[in-house]
Amino acid sequence: MGTTSSNNQMALYSAITAAVTWLLFGCGLCFSFGIPPFAICTAALFLLGNAGAAFTGWRGRQQIAESAGAEGGDSLALGGLVAGGVGIVLALLALVAAIILTVIGGAAVLNQ
């Protein structure tokens, strides 16, 4: 009978954090669309959540490698790491876009 290894906790946290962050970002975009200050908050929270997912995924993969087969969950950690990395890039783009729209909107109000 083969031995079973338990999933690394950091890998599990990474996958859960990435999934919840992406879900909340999708909902947040629906509510903040057209309201730049809310969009800035949504993008900033998305950035923080994805940074957490990427960090825990990276750390989880390190711990799994150090465990020499005693722990599993490398695919969970990798998924969280990739989703977190992609999310960081998208969050930065969304944050820049929201700030630009806020500045343009403020300038348009002042020019009336």
Image (cartoon, grey):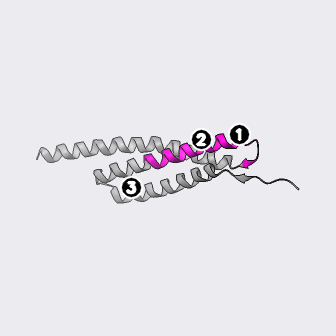
Camera-near label (3 vs 2) is 2
> Residue 84 appears at what percent x and percent y?
52, 45
Label 3 crowd bin: few (<14), some (14–19), many (20+), radius 10 Å: some
At 61% across and 49% down in the image, what residue appears? 10
Label 1 crowd bin: few (<14), some (14–19), many (20+), radius 10 Å: few
Q: Which residue is mark 1?
A: 66
Q: Which residue is mark 2?
A: 58
The span picked out in magenta is 47-71
| SS of the residue under disc 2 | helix
The answer to the question of whether label 3 and label 1 lie on touching residues, with beta carbons closer than 8 A, is no
Q: Amino acid at mark 2?
A: Trp
Q: Residue furthest left?
A: 112
- Front in this rendered view, residue 60 or 105: 60
> Residue 30 appears at what percent x and percent y?
38, 59
Magenta-colored segment: predominant secondary structure: helix
Q: Amino acid at mark 1?
A: Glu
| SS of the residue under disc 1 | helix
At 43% across and 49% down in the image, what residue appears? 46
Q: Which residue is mark 3?
A: 29
Q: Amino acid at mark 3?
A: Leu
**Magenta stretch holds residue 98:** no
Image quarter hosting the N terminus? bottom right
Q: CA distance from mark 3 to mark 1?
A: 39 Å
